[in-house]
Amino acid sequence: MDLILDGITKAFWLLISFDPEVLGITLLSLKISGSATLISLFLGISAGALVALTRFPGRRFVVGLINTGMALPPVVVGLFVTIFLWRNGPLGFLGILYTPEAMILAQAIIATPIVTGISLAALQQLPAKLRLQILALGATRAQMVWILVKEAKLPLLAAVMAGFGGVISEVGASIMVGGNIKGYSRVLTTATVMETGKGEFDVAIALSILLLLLAYSINVVLTQIQQRERPR
Amino acid sequence: MSLPVPVFEARNLQVIRGGSLILNVPALIITDGEMLSIIGPNGAGKSTLLQSLAALIKPSRGEVLFRGQRIGAEIPLLAYRRKLAMILQEPLLFDTTVFNNVASGLKLRGLKRHEYEPIVVKCLDRFGIAHLGDRSARSLSGGEARRTSIARAFATEPEVLLLDEPFSALDPIIREALLEDLEQVLRETRITTIFVTHDRQEALRLSSRLGVMMAGEILQEGSPQEIMKRPVNEFVATLVGIETIVAAEVVRRKPDTFVASVAGHEIEAVGGRDAGEQVLLCIRSENIALSSPEAAAPPHPRNFFCGRIKKITPLWLHQRVQLDCGFPVVAYVTNQSLTSFPLAEGMEVAVSFNPADVCVIPNRSIVKTGSQ
């Protein structure tokens, strides 16, 4: 119990003292996971819209793959991103292994199926005839997709929350492709793993509390938007 | 002198889904300013026809011409769709204000705020929702939402209006008010309108021409009066509200009429039929008179029968009386008539109708609907 109380006290001090290392780790976590979420939103909503609004052979198989992708283990993603970015790998020429860019790539791969799956479900739950109504109003296909995405904005906010939540909390891929390099690619999750390994439980607890606070703050903002927009 | 080019011309239009033919319209022409109503039960293919005409679904075979131009070939699809407006069963409003909903079609056409604002204001006013402009569409009642969807359709000033059962699921008072407003606007604007519904009362109010659909086919089309008086088969007769339909055999021919035998009774009808022909005799309920069996002069002595009242169902303005005359008969009696001639179940009455009010359908055209 003392251990937990010490951790909470330590977190409090780290927060109010604006510890430069902790601040750097927190900001880098936010930057990497935020960027990955933005990329996954672009890719995921586009892919979700494409699958939701078109009929093609093997569509169910694709939907099954997307749903499976929502449970993609981060270590598997980390492994394959590492192989691809390895000096001799297909993308080795990029030279980004053990950089924040590699972490963004890995996290985007983790978040994209989550956002795709939720976007797909969100667009499919819109009234079937809404598409006809939009086209009958004289919309182009692009205008129709944009209106549908706007109509599904509340469940799509859930996709943002799930996508961000999935990557801010993952550790396996970040360690494997980022290397947990101090001051360069160390984020809250990788730092927590490292401190736990060292037996520095109070610091690990402090970092965990910071991680929870960060995730909570982002989700509070998104939840506020979502609930304000909720149909009455 | 050449004939005017029709607004729509459907040629051999067929839609096949899952191997089933769900729409089969060999020919359909709709002229400028016409108000065509299509009635039929659920699943008759009415909405599919409307969506095919609007080029919202691709027909499996055939084509639709708009003012003589092939859609998608001679007239671009988007340009074509922007000449139409469609109102579906559900209002399907967007998650924004009523003003923005009404403006949506105009915004999609690239109009700037200063261009669309006066049009939207006028439309909001015309449909009595000017006070709702800033309200969220999500907070509207069913009637308000429906008015908004109609205003949204009219805001684009369409050449053709397509209505897909827009009054379903509305309570009678709101429906009546909306019908009244829409009827007035359609008469003022003289927009070519195609209206699909399963409600014959709505169809009669909003049409200059009526079509009856079943199983993907248009069974009959013509003026509402023509279809009401001369349905081509039992299904159409039932759909246009004829409740007394009896199978009969012609027993003799007269100069302008014929006599047919029905369960041992003889019914006289106008027309030329030969003895032995199998026919269906249809009599509208409002054309059947009930009187006392002891009355000295029945209203229609040539078709005069005694019958027993089986059931009386009170309706809003009249009573529906089901009788057994050896064959089933349904008559409507106004509430006012009941005060001078009270009726009761089990009572014996005289039933009579004019031979000119008997519609005759050849028995070969019977369509079994299972509704009797």
Image (cartoon, coloured by chain):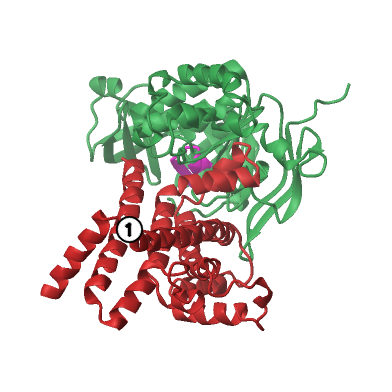
The reply to whether residue B303 is visible in this rendering is yes
Magenta stretch: residue B238 in it? yes
Residue B46 position by quadrant: top right
Amino acid type of disc 1?
A: Leu
Q: Residue furthest right?
A: B1
Which residue corresponds to the image point at 25% horizontal and 67% vertical from the top-left?
A206
Which residue corresponds to the image point at 25% horizontal and 64% vertical from the top-left?
A209
Name the residue carrying label 1: A214
Which residue corresponds to the image point at 48% horizontal and 79% vertical from the top-left?
A176
User: Chain drawn green, letter?
Assistant: B
Q: Residue furthest left?
A: A1
Query: Could you tell me residue B127's position as x and y percent?
Result: 46, 21
Query: Could you tell me residue B74's position as x and y percent?
Result: 82, 40
Q: Secondary structure at mark 1?
A: helix
With B191 as the anchor, is B145 left or right in this view? left
Residue B188 position by quadrant: top right
The part of the chain drawn in magenta is: B233-248
With B355 as the anchor, is B306 left or right in this view? left
Q: In front here: B345 or A49?
A: A49
Q: In front here: B218 or A217?
A: A217
Chain A shade: red
| Image mark 1: chain | A
Query: Could you tell me residue B289's position as x and y percent?
Result: 39, 28
